[in-house]
Image (tube, rainbow, N blue to C red):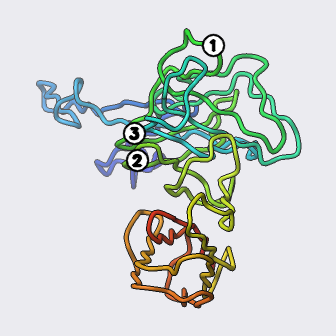
Amino acid sequence: MFDDGMHNDGLANDGIFGASIPGFGEGTYVRYYVEATANDGVGTISYMPLGAEHDVYIYRVNIGKSNITDVVINEIMASNATTIADQDGEFDDWIELYNLSSNTIDLSGWSISDNPDNLTKFTFANGTTIASNGYLSIWADEDGLQSGLHANFKLSAAGENLYLIDKDIKIVDSMSFGQQITDKGFARVPNGLGNFIIQEPTYNKSNDIVLTVKEQSNLEFKVYPNPAKNFIIIGYSGVALKNIDIFNSVGTKIAQYDSIGNGEKINTDTWAPGMYVIKAGAISKKVMIVK
């Protein structure tokens, strides 16, 4: 360290010392401590932090962002009990990628990981591609002996982080999630672009659910417009709608109605943007609110 007024140490010979740590590569962990020897005739030594050399200061050089932005983590399921099985009939965690571009993208040498300290935890084999506007799913089951894409880690239903890394060890995409619900997807809505919400899974399909499809029930209703801004209209045929509940994307009930007439308008001015579920009896419909 220096007290020469040229190393961010104030004035020369003022008793304030400064030094610079050299640059390191992206993702490198840098550990350091300060040792000072007193000019007291006996060479008294002191340390910062006090526990050095065992306790040290530490920081990590940031990982750079990839120039490739067309592939995203699109949907995950961290608790799969009955939704979809792999080729061996096992219901495992899964991760879905989506290619936003009109070109096939080569994923050879790319990685996906749930550990920021090991971003190349699972690396895609040479020849792995994702088709234009296509999907690619990875089973997160710690079972590399099975055929297909099986990552060497599982997802935590209690929540964690995911990182998609290109072959140059740059971050293409990343996401974090909290507590998950068994057999529910955690998906970007709108598909490939939006924020993540908990909804019915759409494995290897668009996350944008069409809400006017007839349900297998003696009760039919639809919600429109969708997406909606200032209001929604509920229309139905068959039996009257009774006991209607409306939930936001995290499952909180925001409204309840004893009954709603056919074609009745519901004001949504005060609703935050996002996905909502309208439930009547055993039938549910989803609607996206935009502002």
Distance, label 1 to label 2, CA atoms, is 27 Å
Q: Nearer the viewer, mark 2 or mark 3?
A: 2
Query: Would you place residue 37 above or below residue 260 in this image?
Result: above
Where on the picture, by quarter, is residue 257? Answer: bottom left
Q: What residue is shown at x 47% (from left), y 19% (from top)?
A: 142
Query: Residue at the location (70% across, 45% down)?
Result: 205
Q: Which circle marks residue 2 in the picture?
A: 3
Give the mark nearest the N terminus, 2 or 3.
3
Instruction: Measuring from the top left, give residue 17's x and y in whole percent.
Output: 34, 44
User: Mark 2, residues whose alpha carbon is within 10 Å: few (<14), some, or many (≥20)?
Assistant: some
Crowding around mark 1 (Cα neighbors within 10 Å: few <14, some 14 to 19, many 20+) is few
- Locate the N terminus by quadrant: top left
Q: Earlier in the sequence, mark 1 or mark 2?
A: 1
Q: Amino acid at mark 2?
A: Gln
State the SS at label 2: loop
Residue farthest to the right? 103
- Position of residue 75 relative to residue 279, above or below, is above
Asked if marks 1 and 2 touch (Cβ < 8 Å), the reply is no
Q: Check disc 3 and report its element: helix, strand or loop.
A: loop
Give the residue at the far top of this rendering: 145
Label 1's element?
Answer: loop
What x and y, as percent, mark residue 179? Answer: 36, 48
Q: Residue at x 47, y 72 (%)?
A: 280
* Quadrant occupied by the C terminus: bottom right
Picture quarter containing residue 130? top right
Which of the pair 44/93 is nearer the observer? Answer: 93
Q: Amino acid at mark 1?
A: Ser
- What type is the residue that disc 3 sits on? Phe
Q: Which mark is residue 147?
A: 1
* Sooner in the amino-acid sequence: mark 1 or mark 3: 3
**Placement of 272 over or under 194, stated as above or below:** below
Q: Say which residue label 2 marks.
A: 180
